Image: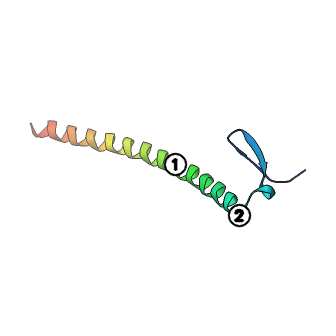
Amino acid sequence: SDEQTVTIDDTEYKVSDLSKDQVRFVNHVTDLDRQLAQLGMSAEQAQVGRKHFMGLLSESLKVEN
């Protein structure tokens, strides 16, 4: 069937069997997973940016000395 299911702790549940609060919790967890993935990408981008600017800083200090 095309009934919507969700897997929680290795158990599959029909969304229609969940309470409103349980559906809300699932939606929060799903959204937080998305946010965590985005934060991971942002952290990686920030690390690359920091490395780049630290390199520019180091090079500029070499020129002055």
Rendered view: 48 above or below 19: above
Residue drawn 54% across the image and 47% down it: 37
- Where is residue 44? Give x, y as percent: 43, 42
Between 5 and 61, which is closer to the camera in this rendering?
Answer: 5
Task: Give, as a three-letter code, the residue at label 1.
Answer: Leu
| Residue under pointer 2 | 20
Quadrant containing the C terminus in the rendered view: top left
Q: Is residue 30 above or below residue 50?
A: below
Disc 2 element: helix
The type of residue carrying mark 2 is Lys
Residue 18 place in picture, x, y as percent = 75, 57
| Residue drawn 37% across the image and 42% down it | 47
Name the element at disc 1.
helix
Give the residue number, with chain letter if any, for mark 1.
Answer: 36
The Cα–Cα distance between marks 2 and 1, rounded to whole angstroms, is: 24 Å
64, 47: nearer the viewer? 47
